[in-house]
Amino acid sequence: MAQIEGSKMLAYLRKNHHDKLALCDRLEEIADALPDNIDRQICSTTARAIEPILKKAHQYEEEELYPALQRLLNGKPDQTLMFDRLKSEHYEDRCFGEEVRDVLISYGEGKPTQTADATGYMLRGFFESLRRHVALEAELARPLRDIKIAASDNKSNAAD
């Protein structure tokens, strides 16, 4: 893998992680506002943001990041299983995200379909799962950080 490629991949991953964590923050704010301080507009805009954020991130991870990391890590069988598990978590996140979207839409319309306690529990389960996934990917991307550091070190050594 070229050094510049690792740097670009890491930058794109960071952007996706930033977007997912911002979504998690919004979901946590909504959960904290339940039951009496719900902002219907925030519920609606957050509901519409879930699918595009996840779709963009998952597509990049599955088509670019995971294959590159597997090559970098020499595609050992236990690592292949780990990446397969992450891909299956993407499917679960998309399904759970659809449920969260539907509930948030109902709150945005002022017609909640479930209790505030159930909604809070649902939102927390979803955003905590996303945050754990982001944390694991950040650790898995460590070899990309090392490549970026190595590229910087080589430039400074060449200047000496």
Image (cartoon, rainbow, N blue to C red):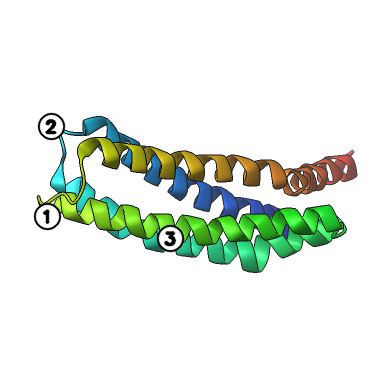
Choose the circle earlier in sequence order: 1 or 3: 3
Tell me the CA gap for discs 2 and 1.
Answer: 15 Å
**Image coords of residue 139 (percent x, y):** 69, 41
Quadrant placement of the N terminus: bottom right
Tell me the CA gap for discs 1 and 3.
Answer: 22 Å
Which numbered tag is attached to residue 36?
Answer: 2
Give the residue type at disc 3: Cys
Which residue is identified by label 1?
Answer: 109
Q: Nearer the viewer, residue 158 or 113?
A: 113
Q: Is residue 74 above or below residue 127?
A: below
Choose the circle earlier in sequence order: 2 or 1: 2
Quadrant placement of the C terminus: top right
Q: In the picture provided, is 26 more to the left or to the right than 145?
A: left
Residue with the most extreme left position: 110
Q: Secondary structure at mark 1?
A: loop
Give the residue type at disc 1: Glu
Which residue is identified by label 3?
Answer: 95
At label 2, counting other C-alpha atoms closer than 10 Å, the crowd grade (few under 14, some 14-19, many 20 or more) is few
